[in-house]
Amino acid sequence: MTVLFLNGPNLNLLGTRQPEIYGRTTLSDIEAMVRQRAETLGVVIEFRQTNHEGELVTWLQQSRGKADAIVLNAAAYTHTSVALRDAITASEVPTIEIHLSNIHAREEFRHRSFIAPVCRGQIAGFGARSYLLGLEAAVSINEPL
């Protein structure tokens, strides 16, 4: 099984950007944690980050037929991007939306997710653990009940 982790804008600044909201764990630290857990599950992961919406769209399009699941932290694009929503749908790859903070407990403009309706589910508010929960969700959606 292959799970693609896609990370949007400003996530490259984790650890230093608003640590009171996002914590002090860096994206590299999160990737290492996810890789370690994925190895115990026998899952291959690919981890990417970009500040460019179009690059996320391209990666989503390219995932079709290559990834079994996507774990997506679209960051601010969650609340603005119809293009990402359409790319998720077009990919036909089950996608899990994740967030470090609880977007529903923050500013009102963060309460709306353009991508949630086309994702299998949403995980928010568990800090770096949101990524591990995203991995577990990605594995479980591809297993029969």
Image (tube, grey):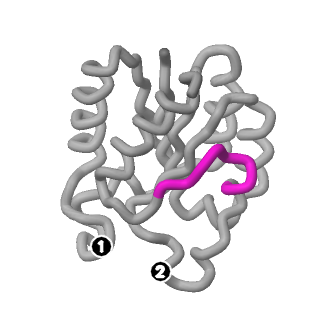
Query: Which quadrant of the figure contains the C terminus?
Result: top right
Q: How far apart are marks 2 and 1 (CA)?
A: 16 Å
Up-down relation of residue 99 to residue 55 (above or below): below
Q: Position of residue 53 (x, y in %)?
A: 63, 49
- Mark nearer the viewer, 2 or 1: 2
Q: Residues within 10 Å of mark 1 (few under 14, many from 20)?
A: few
Judged left or right of residue 114, residue 70 is: left
- Out of 136 and 71, give the one closest to the viewer: 136
In terms of depth relative to the viewer, which is nearer, 66 or 68?
A: 68
Q: In this view, does 80 lie above or below 73?
A: below
Q: Residue at x 19, y 61 (%)?
A: 24
Q: Which residue is drawn at 34% across and 42% down?
A: 132
For this orientation, the residue located farthest to the bottom is 108
Residue, disc 1: 18
For label 2, the crowd category at 10 Å Cα-Cα, with few meaning under 14, some 14 to 19 and many 20 or more, is few
Whether 2 is drawn above or below 90: the answer is above
Residue 121 % position (x, y): 60, 49
Which region is colored magenta?
116-123
Q: Where is residue 81 in the image (x, y as percent from the top left)?
A: 71, 58
Residue 6: % across, % down: 50, 39
The answer to whether 88 appears left or right of 110 in the picture is: right
Q: Which residue corresponds to mark 2?
A: 105
- The secondary structure type at the circle numbered 2 is helix
Residue 13, magenta (yes or no): no
Residue drawn 39% across the image and 54% down it: 11
> Helix, strand or loop at disc 1?
loop
Residue type at numbered disc 1: Gln
Q: Are marks 2 and 1 in contact (CB under 8 Å)?
A: no
Q: In which quarter of the image is residue 17?
A: bottom left
Left or right side of 59 for 104: left
From the viewer's perspective, is residue 93 above or below residue 117? above
Three-letter amino acid code at the position of disc 2: Ala
